[in-house]
Image (spheres, grey):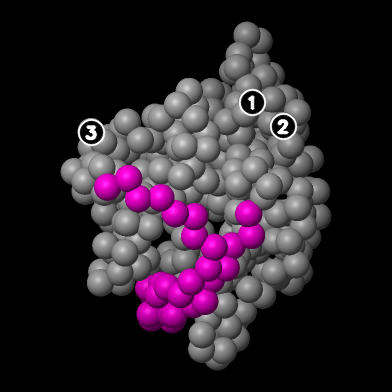
Amino acid sequence: MATDFTELGAFLKTRRARVSPQEAGLPPGSRRRVPGLRRDEVARLADISVDYYIELEQGRRQGPSVAVLKALAVALRLDATETEYLMHLAGHPAPLGGDTLRMQSTLQHLLEQLQDTPALVITDLYEVVMQNRACQVLVGPHRVRSGRGASFVYQWFTNTGVRHVYPQDDHVFHSRRMVADLRTAAARRGPHDQAVQAVVKALLVESREFATLWADHQIAICHEGRKRIVNPVLGVVEVQWNSFFTADAAQRLMWMAPVDSTVSQRIAELDPYEVWQKTPAPAEPVSTVAAVQAS
């Protein structure tokens, strides 16, 4: 397939210009000399280096992977048609299609109303679709990944380094809750759904803990509750959380209200990347892709 990396760079630049920092969950800042997002902000949202992204915009970087392009599509809030176009410009014959994590319009509208409340949209496989800035401060900016590695449930059982977001005493509770939720999602999706079957089959092989819990056949859909989150600056934060589900239960909006009201003010004052930049990334086993910071 023919490639046009100059056109790819121009397309990225125009789409970067139309996304405001607030839409991307970033603080507006001051003295912005460009409309929309800066290059370094896009790079951070897509979890790639600034130099790499600059080369993409300048048409000097060839062969970006599907994973990188998917991360950019999410960071730049591209719709399905734009994402397909981006893939073709980079020389990939197959668009992401239904694999693209696109936020349903109702959830997008609600998320935009919760600027000061930590909130995120996830799928029924615990794939992070979008976080607002307050959520990034509280639990850390997530990394966009594809395949089963995008599922936080998969990461939870195969890469215990991601568990640092919760106190160790709460790990058993969260393991049971996520497995019960995943089993419910698997039943709803059916035995022929490749995405959920890939996650479940891999976990049954790779995690004895998951296999044991899966054999219990517990089911549950969690709508609300309390939990504790470990933040490198705020310490252990207890939150009351609630979820709003779409009609098909494929996506949910989760928002978290700190029990201590003074924490909310501190969250509003902090920059997520400054909070989490000194926290080492969780070590990854060979079989995984990367961690996703989520609920």
Direction from residue 180 to residue 12 in the image, left or right: right
The picture places residue 145, in percent across and down from the top left corner, at 48, 40
Name the one closer to the observer, 268 or 173. 173
Cα gap from disc 1 to disc 3, whole angstroms: 28 Å
Mark 2, residue position: 80
Q: What residue is rendered at 31% in x and 33% in y?
A: 202
Please, which residue is most extreme toward the top here? 1
Q: Relative to 259, say whether 241 is above or below.
A: above
Q: Quadrant of residue 248?
A: top right
Q: Residue 169: horizontal and vertical position, in percent?
A: 25, 72
**Among numbered discs 3 and 2, the one appearing first in the sequence:** 2
Disc 3 marks which amino acid?
Val
Q: Can residue 202 be seen in the rendering of this structure?
A: yes
* 148 on left or right of 91: left
Is 77 on the left or on the right of 54, as rendered?
Answer: right
Distance between the alpha carbons at the discs numbered 2 and 1: 7 Å
Look at label 2 and name its amino acid: Ala
| Label 2: few (<14), some (14–19) or many (≥20) C-alpha neighbours in 10 Å | some
Task: Say which residue label 1 marks.
Answer: 97
Can you say whether 39 is above or below 56 in the image?
Answer: below
Residue 111 picture quarter: bottom right
Q: Which residue is mark 3?
A: 205
Task: Indicate which disc, 2 or 1, sits on the residue closer to the N terminus.
Answer: 2
Q: Residues within 10 Å of mark 1 (few under 14, many from 20)?
A: few
Q: CA distance from mark 3 to mark 2?
A: 34 Å
Q: What SS does tag 2 mark?
A: helix
Quadrant location of the N terminus in the rendered image: top right
Toward which corner of the image does residue 277 lie, by quadrant?
bottom left
